[in-house]
Image: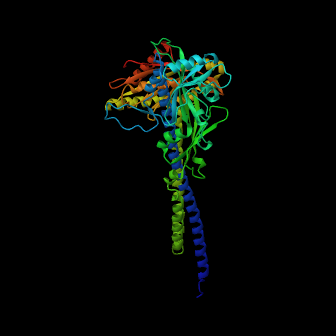
């Protein structure tokens, strides 16, 4: 009987060796792909951390800007209320200002309430004087408590701006009598504040009092200026008196304001981008992580009618929170697992081939189904975003706003909370469309949306209803009076000039506010009340807000 040929052992060994090589190559490739996928997940997580930090920092700057604006406006009103302002009067109205952290005095009713102003070098009262008026102005302020005052005019100008009263917050000695008109940046801000009757920020420059310091100790700084008009009941009521000026050192501002919000997790650069060419102001001392440029975040804020840019980069401390070694660990684990599988290939080769064929087909079918479901969910999500958001500004549209309002009213009725609706209509928007074109109008609408986002809280809903109509839904108000703070902030935010291709455009807004505490009130009724209040604001002069009666 003939012998059946047997398989050569050497051939089987070569086949097994070839399979082991294939497994190693496939496993290595899979491990690399898995490591890359983990790295992408880490990058997305780091990106979310950066977004959170950037939003928190930009909101902190916006809050501080409004606080400085309010402080300067209050100081200007206090100075203007004095019939015969003296050095002692100025010291009294500025006595609560400080750069230091404010201690908790909530249990001491008799304690003063100091106001912390991070980065501020000092505050001053500045008055204008023509060349022929200088002796009389000098004599007047010597009689008001500044006996050693000497006004020193610099240059041949039709008008000079002299510091006659000052309070320093940085430990330096105040120099009175200095002519600020010699600094073009300060002169520009003073004239802008006087012409607009609003707080104005200067371009960055080295403060006059810092120019005697060593070069290494000088900082790029800027000033915030508020015009002072005589108050009601004074002999010169309504007349322009001068300016209250606040010096801000850029480096101190960044480190004292923003470092408390970001710590050592990020590096922050502050740029003035109001001019044709952006100008760097200052950078924190933190070192950005090399190779992390893709994680940089940029935010813009409005301070004193000027636009400022924040460039935020991660440091090694922030990236360590994402466990940057995890992709390497995952890759090593994958390679180790591949080697273990390769050791078992020869013994289970035939069975695994059949199982792998069946499993591969099943896995492909499952993956195709998952991919189809994922594409369907993504399409549904994108369609919902398009359906519920304004395509120009990215704000919620009328439909999404109405849904959130109905849900908020139901929730607040059960919990007994307070919410409010602000209905906002731009004053003078049609004139911009008619004179500058619809593209300019679109630019104003986009900038308006950004300003409203900065005025609102993170939990609020900002929406565009169409045209130049906007709305804000505020929930969980601590007190009904809080809505007036937000409404006033919205009115003042719209007063600053809009930048339309380098050309300023000035408009205002009328705001109607409807407050809802509890009860069976429909969303339509609350919106109608806010709309009627907005028309009442327009009817009484525009550029203001009006509170509606409870619907």
Question: Is 463 placed left or right of 130 in the picture?
Answer: left
Numbered circles on residues, count: 0
Quadrant of the drawing holding the C terminus: top left
x and y percentages locating residue 83 in the rendered image:
46, 15
Residue 485: where, in percent of width, then height?
A: 43, 26
Q: Nearer the viewer, residue 218 or 297?
A: 218
Relative to 439, say whether 41 is above or below: below
Give the camera-side residue of 419 and 359: 419
Q: Can residue 504 be seen in this view?
A: yes
Residue at x 58% of width, y 65% of height: 28
| Viewport quadrant of the N terminus | bottom right
Residue positioned most to the right: 156
Task: Identify the residue at horizontal 40%, vertical 21% (top origin).
Answer: 525
Up-down: is 241 above or below 350?
Answer: above
* Colour treatment of the image: rainbow
Quadrant housing residue 283: top right
User: Compared with residue 449, is residue 232 higher up or lower down, i.e. above or below?
Assistant: above
Q: Which residue is drawn at 49% across and 40% down?
A: 256
Tell me where residue 202 sits by quadrant: top right
**Residue 259's spot in the image, x, y percent?**
49, 43
Q: In this view, does 335 lie above or below 257?
A: below
Q: Is residue 434 left or right of residue 408?
A: right
Residue 400, percent from left and from top:
47, 31
- Kindly tell me whether residue 397 is visible in this rendering: no
Q: Is residue 406 left or right of residue 383?
A: left
Q: Which residue lies furthest to the front in this view?
A: 148
């Amino acid at each position: 009987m003939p012998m059946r040929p047997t398989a050569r052992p050497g051939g089987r060994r070569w086949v097994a060796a070839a399979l082991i090589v294939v497994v190693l190559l496939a496993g290595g490739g899979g491990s690399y792909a898995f490591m890359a996928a983990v790295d992408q997940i880490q990058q997305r997580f780091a990106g979310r951390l950066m977004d959170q930090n950037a939003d928190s920092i930009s909101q902190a700057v916006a809050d501080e800007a409004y606080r400085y604006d309010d402080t300067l406006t209050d100081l200007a009103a206090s100075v203007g209320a004095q019939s015969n302002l003296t050095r002692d009067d100025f010291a009294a109205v500025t006595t609560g200002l400080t750069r230091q952290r404010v201690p908790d005095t909530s249990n001491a009713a008799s304690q003063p309430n100091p106001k912390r102003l991070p980065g501020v070098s000092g505050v001053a009262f500045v008055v204008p004087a023509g060349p022929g008026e200088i002796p009389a102005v000098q004599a007047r302020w010597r009689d008001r408590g500044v006996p050693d005052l000497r006004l020193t005019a610099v240059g041949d100008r039709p008008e000079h701006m002299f510091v006659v009263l000052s309070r320093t917050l940085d430990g330096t000695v105040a120099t009175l009598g200095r002519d600020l008109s010699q600094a073009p940046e300060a002169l520009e801000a003073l004239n802008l504040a006087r012409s607009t009757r609003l707080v104005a920020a200067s371009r960055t420059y080295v403060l006059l009092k810092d120019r005697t310091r060593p070069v290494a100790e000088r900082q790029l700084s800027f000033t915030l200026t508020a015009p002072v008009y005589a108050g009601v009941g004074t002999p010169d009521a309504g007349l322009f008196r001068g300016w209250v000026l606040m010096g801000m050192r850029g480096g101190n501002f960044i480190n004292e304001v923003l470092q408390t919000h970001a710590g050592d997790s990020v590096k922050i650069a502050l740029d003035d981008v109001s001019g044709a060419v952006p100008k760097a102001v200052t950078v924190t001392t933190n070192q950005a992580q090399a190779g992390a440029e893709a994680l940089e975040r940029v935010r813009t804020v409005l301070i004193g009618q000027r636009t400022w840019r924040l460039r935020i980069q991660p440091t090694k401390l922030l990236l360590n929170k994402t466990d940057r070694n995890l992709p390497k660990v995952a890759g090593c684990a994958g390679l180790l697992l591949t080697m273990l599988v390769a050791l078992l290939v020869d013994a289970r080769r035939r069975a695994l081939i059949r199982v792998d064929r069946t499993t591969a087909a099943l896995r492909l079918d499952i993956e195709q189904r998952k991919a189809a479901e994922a594409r369907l969910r993504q399409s549904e999500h994108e369609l919902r975003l398009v359906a519920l958001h304004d395509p120009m500004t990215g704000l919620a549209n009328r439909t999404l706003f109405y849904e959130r309002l109905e849900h908020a009213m139901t929730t607040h009725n059960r919990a007994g909370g307070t919410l409010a609706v602000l209905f906002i209509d731009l004053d003078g928007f049609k004139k911009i469309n008619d004179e500058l074109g619809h593209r300019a109008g679109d630019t104003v609408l986009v900038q308006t949306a950004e300003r409203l986002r900065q005025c609102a809280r993170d939990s609020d809903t900002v929406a565009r209803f169409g045209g130049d109509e906007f709305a804000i839904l505020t929930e969980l108000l601590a007190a009904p009076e809080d809505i007036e703070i937000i409404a006033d902030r919205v009115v003042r935010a719209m007063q600053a000039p809009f930048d339309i291709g380098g050309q300023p455009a000035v408009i205002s807004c009328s705001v109607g506010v409807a407050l809802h505490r509890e009860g069976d009130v429909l969303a339509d009724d609350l919106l109608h009340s806010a709309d009627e209040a907005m028309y009442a604001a327009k009817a009484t002069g525009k550029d203001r807000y009006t509170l509606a009666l409870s619907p």
